[in-house]
Amino acid sequence: MNRLLSGLAANPALPPALVDRLMALALKEARTGPESELAEDVLHELADRADLRHDQVLELAAQAQSTAVVLAYRGRLAAADVDPGSMPYAAIALLDEGRGRPEWARLLAAHPDSGVRWKLASCPNLPADVVDLLAVDPDVEVVEELALWTATPVTVRLALHPDPRVRFAVAANPATPLEAVVALAEDPELTLNWALSERTDLPQSLYARLAADPLPGVRATYARNPGIGQELIRVLAADREDSVRRALTEHPDVPLGLLAELVAGGRAGWRLLPRIAAATPAELAELAASRQAAVRMLVAQRRDLPAELRDALAVDPDAAVVRAVAPHPGLPEGLLRAMVERHGVQVLAGVAANPDASGPLLEHLTQHRPGVRKALQDVARHPHATGPALLACLPDRTARPLAAAHPALPPAVVTELLADEDRQVAEAAAGNPALPRTAMTALVP
């Protein structure tokens, strides 16, 4: 029942009268049993609803600090709705969003609970006097959090802090001035290879030193960093670890020729890489004409290809290239069906993920034998899926909860699934807007 009521609380078609009843039930449960799982789950889902009245929002916020924080971040609570004394974390959420009152920061910076001060320290645009107060907080974890997130000049001062944890946080902060970071890189107490891996403004000599780390994971992080220059790119391209060379393919300025070398022979499902996303039409055409299927597959990841290039890749002799281009919007249905006829199970999931796939095509995909589980999942979540296509997805245990939530599923089937032995399926059915109102009413005591 908990799962059903939780799903029902998220149902966008739930009538206002049932929202009221469900909220009253959950609030009553919360008051009589503060640890009630039913109350927690239902109230969490109700907080997500866009149709709550303001009085309901306030009632939910008063029930639990965690719910108030969620409502604050979602814009449902305004400054006038929050008392920083009784709802400190909701007040911090509003400060974090730039919708709180400056005097709250001064009040909360002196809060007796260090957890509140710690959370406050990560907020942007705090008044200068609040930053100064947090910078000398008796709890070093508060100072460390400030050092990690503040964009103020206090980082220069905190770079000299006696606690290495604070200095490390200063080094990891992208807003710390370069001079302070370079000085910290010479600090014998700190190992900053991870901490500086996101900085894009370091001297190339420092990048070269940091990227020579014995850990492949560290080298891979620097291989992705847009700040490293061509010389270091070439060095990392010869790295002995596959993970480092693979990471280098994600660098936005990797030369296209080198990129082709790095992916040569690879049959993995490459995602859209930054250099490919920025490629010109002429560069894309040149890459699409490559003899290497792995290179053509990179181009096929773009979703804004010219129609003639997109359609040429759709009839590529290599199934991996076709699979990569199959989800591209605008592909004619004839080409999508031809893909399935030529390559079968290798492209079913890609075709099912195409946003323009029609209802009849999706039905056709579900009837393919052998089937593909991933294709059934994509059909079950597809907005064009028809009732027959969704019914064909129900026997698969991974596609079943997705199909149970789809509004095109026949209402009678949705109602039956409320009693499904898989609780995830039952919850999805309860949240389905196709669930008849009579069934909704019957669920709420």
Image (cartoon, rainbow, N blue to C red):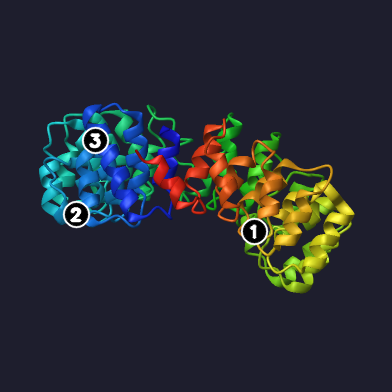
SS at badge 3: helix
Q: Image quarter for residue 111?
A: top left
- Local packing at callout 1 (Cα closer than 10 Å; few below 14, some 14-19, many 20+) is some
Can I make out residue 88 in this image? yes
Which residue corresponds to mark 2? 100
Which part of the image, by quadrant, shows the C terminus? Answer: top left
Labels 1, 2: front one:
2
Which of label 1 and label 3 is nearer to you? Answer: 3
235 to the left or right of 40: right
Quadrant where the image shows the N terminus = top left
Q: 423 or 285, which lies in front?
A: 423
Residue 29, quarter of the rendered image = top left
The answer to whether residue 156 shows anywhere in this view is no
Image coords of residue 239 (percent x, y): 69, 38
Query: In the rendered structure, which amino acid carries the disc numbered 2?
Result: Gly
Is residue 391 found left or right of 123 in the rendered image? right
Which one is in front, 135 or 413?
413
Callout 3 environment at 10 Å: few (<14), some (14 to 19), or many (20+)? few
The local secondary structure at tag 2 comes to loop
Q: Earlier in the sequence, mark 1 or mark 3?
A: 3
Sequence-first disc among 1 and 2 = 2
**Distance between the Cα atoms at labels 1 and 2?**
41 Å
* Relative height, residue 223 to residue 358 (above, below): above
Q: Identify the residue position indicated by label 1 in the image.
A: 275
* Sequence-first tag of 2 and 3: 3
Q: Please, is residue 304 above or below residue 148 in the view? A: below
Q: Nearer the viewer, residue 116 or 442?
A: 442
Query: Residue 128's spot in the image, x, y percent?
Result: 16, 51
Residue of label 3: 28
Question: How far is mark 1 from mark 3, CA to CA?
Answer: 56 Å
